[in-house]
Amino acid sequence: MSNKKGGKLIVFSAPSGSGKTTIVRHLLAQPELNLEFSVSAASRAPRGEEKDGQDYYFLSLEDFKQNIKDDNFLEWEEVYRDNFYGTLKTEVERIWALGKNVIFDIDVVGGLRIKRKFPERTLAVFVKPPSVDELKIRLKKRKTESEEKINMRIAKASVEMATAPSFDHIILNDTLEHALEEAEKLVATHISKPIIGEVDLNQ
Ligand code: 5GP
């Protein structure tokens, strides 16, 4: 790896519909935080306006499984049945080579896995929606998925909520303004800390 010292890792995880993507976008727009979005690989088809290499690296199920075999992922997860998502090691290398910190918008299991692997350099934040009912309303408003898919995501949300205490911080997204402010402060504090030692993404 060109930059063995690397940068910081910042994980935002939450049930889908909790508003974490809005928070992550806001953080990316703050130049002083020096963040770059980690584009995950996914085995699902693009939705709506999603673009390959921008929202996800869209891989076939077969290609995804080959990358697992080749040990190319920092973490991966079968988030929904036959829908695999994962972070390629090359993505983190790419961002660190730019001299930037990596921000992840990923599932709770993947997020905690990164935290466990790199405890010092990772800030893991859980974004909590005000309630499961509110989550349902937000997902329906999004109008990108079928009723069945929405129900699947709601069922998963309760399981995900139970993992919140394992994160470094929980942000309650009741008013967006407060959530954005809190997120900015947490990230700024984390990136101001010095990096100790080198990193091995293959650990
Ligand atoms: P969606 O299909 O709505 O884009 O994402 C579904 C779920 O997959 C979300 O909870 C999202 O956070 C998660 N996800 C996206 N990328 C990754 C990844 O690289 N690793 C893991 N473990 N989960 C991911």
Image: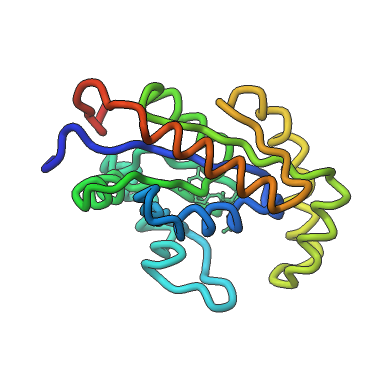
Specify the quadrant that holds the N terminus.
Answer: top left
Answer left or right for 92 relative to 190. left
Name which residue lies at 34% across and 42% down: 73
Answer left or right for 198 relative to 150. left
Up the image or down, 85 lies above or below 109; here it is below
Location of residue 71 (image quadrant):
top left
Tell me how the rendering is colored. rainbow
Q: Position of residue 76 (x, y in %)?
A: 44, 42
Name which residue lies at 33% across and 44% down: 101
Answer left or right for 57 relative to 142. left
**Furthest residue to the bottom?**
49
As rendered, which of 55 and 27 lies closer to the eye? 27
Is any atom of residue 80 visible in this view?
no
Is any atom of residue 168 visible in this view?
yes
Specify the quadrant that holds the C terminus.
Answer: top left
Q: Position of residue 59 (x, y in %)?
A: 40, 62
Name which residue lies at 53% across and 57% down: 26
Q: Position of residue 9 (x, y in %)?
A: 38, 37
**Furthest residue to the right?**
133
Q: Position of residue 111 (x, y in %)?
A: 50, 36
**Number of numbered markers:** 0
Up the image or down, 22 lies above or below 65; here it is below
**Furthest residue to the left?**
2
As rendered, which of 152 and 25 lies closer to the eye? 25
Location of residue 107 (image quadrant):
top right
Answer left or right for 113 relative to 147. left
Up the image or down, 28 lies above or below 106; here it is below
Name which residue lies at 28% across and 38% down: 7
As rendered, which of 185 and 202 lies closer to the eye? 185
